[in-house]
Amino acid sequence: MAVSLLSPAAAAERRVALVIGNSAYKQVPVLDNPANDATDLAAKLGSIGFDVVRGIDLDYSGMRDIIRRFGDKMAGADVALVFYAGHGLQVAGKNYLVPIDAKISNQTDVDLATIDMDLILRAMEADNRTNIVFLDACRDNPFAQKLAANLGTRSASVGRGLAQAQAAVGTLIAYSTQPGNVALDGQGRNSPFTSALLKNIDTPGLSLGDTMIAVRNDVLQQTNGQQVPWDHSSMTGQFYFVPPVPGQGGGASDALAKLEIAFWSSIKDSKNPQLFDAYLKRYPNGAFADIAKINRDQYKAANARPIDEPAQSTPISDPGMLGELRDRLYELNFDPDSPTDRNALRTAIREFQQDSNLPQTGVPTEGLLNRLREIGGLKPWGTIVFSSLADPSYGMSWGHASRKAAVADARKKCGSTKCDVEISFFGTSCAALAYSERKFSIVQRDQLQRAKDAALDDCNKGGKTCRIIGAACADGPEQSTATAKN
């Protein structure tokens, strides 16, 4: 007896899918997995409520016909899904799906013998619905190699893998690996990407976004980090292949998951390995841990390369570039400006160079500025500022996109008093302010409780019992807001 996984709400949705797997190519070697991938995923989608149109080993006319039939089925549908496994081409930033009878030697062959992926996307996005596209078509491609060779000086227009397409509102486009990269075909019945989809797509209560995270982690594990699935989403709400069962989800665990996702979203596009280290400290077994390790190691290796090109060693004299360099150092938590230190810029540069394992010259150069641009900014930021005057007060902020904004907010909260003591922290770092009538201490640590304990230990050396009057983490999961007035 078949058991339905669908809730009444999901069953009420009209879901349609187009699934194509091209393996038996006539002009190039046969691919092992796509026909299996399409067959297995079509069965899985059918079991969770999709009306599936399936095509295996289609020639050009077959692909055109099945796409036309799918277009008819999409009329009035709530959800439309397309899965393609087989060869694909990226030419001049556009993606083309390759039928099994294709002969491709020049641009005219691309136009007349392949299927422009934009045609399918335009048909899907013509109506207001949820649209999902899975492209397992980033294999090492002999069609692309031959085309590039024949195009000669124009061969640069032929890219590896597929290009990243822009998703319209309500659409998610997922690739078996990063845009422009080549995926693995797999050793078993299915490719790594499709295998991970089959494993996760019918998990009750797993949203589309969480499904892609699970797929990404599974593929990373299967390929020893060589392949990283990618997606581009303009979804405006949650979609579940199989909705949550009654009573599933909610509560504290959901809140913690949202904090993790918010932190990851703030760093995922950064090129700073420190941010990925910060994520791994807080979430060593997190949903994004595998990809965080890959990014961290990749950017550590990139940052370790020497800057020895003559142009890169040219000192900066342009005021605008110097201003940018100062701003970028400041946003990396170095302090290039000081009213009492004429050498503050050189000191900040040396400190950055020391942290980056570079020669400590202290000289502002074009190469240094380029390195700072590659790293980008850190976030989120938190700041604690304190006035050590007779009537002490403090200000505290967290969750800001820049150090400058965090400091400004904290000083605003400190009031009209000159808050001359500052500590700023980013990522998942935390800080605490301890105070007594004789002494104060502001300390930064990797966890909130450690920061509180260290601040109290240092402050209590003054001989009088101190108390914590302010503590926060940069990402804001916990704050203490005791008054600073004593």
Image: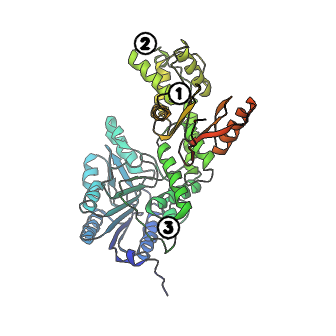
Q: Residues within 10 Å of mark 2 (few under 14, many from 20)?
A: few
- Position of the C terminus, as image quadrant, is top right
N-terminal of the pair, mark 3 or mark 1, is 3
Q: Nearer the viewer, residue 326 or 161?
A: 326
Q: Is residue 152 left or right of residue 335?
A: left
* Residue pointed to by mark 1: 419
Q: What type is the residue that disc 2 sits on?
A: Ser
Quadrant in the rendering for residue 447: top right
Q: Position of residue 10 (x, y in %)?
A: 39, 74
* Residue pointed to by mark 3: 198
Between disc 2 and disc 1, the foreground one is: 1
Note whether 213 is above or below 17 in the view shown.
above
Residues tagged 3 and 2 counted as in contact (Cβ below 8 A): no
Report the Cα–Cα distance between label 3 and label 2.
Answer: 58 Å
* Residue pointed to by mark 2: 317
Quadrant in the rendering for residue 73: bottom left
* Residue occupying the point 59% across, 25% down: 390
N-terminal of the pair, mark 3 or mark 2, is 3
* Mark drawn on residue 33: none
Helix, strand or loop status at disc 3: helix
Q: Position of residue 267 (x, y in %)?
A: 50, 43
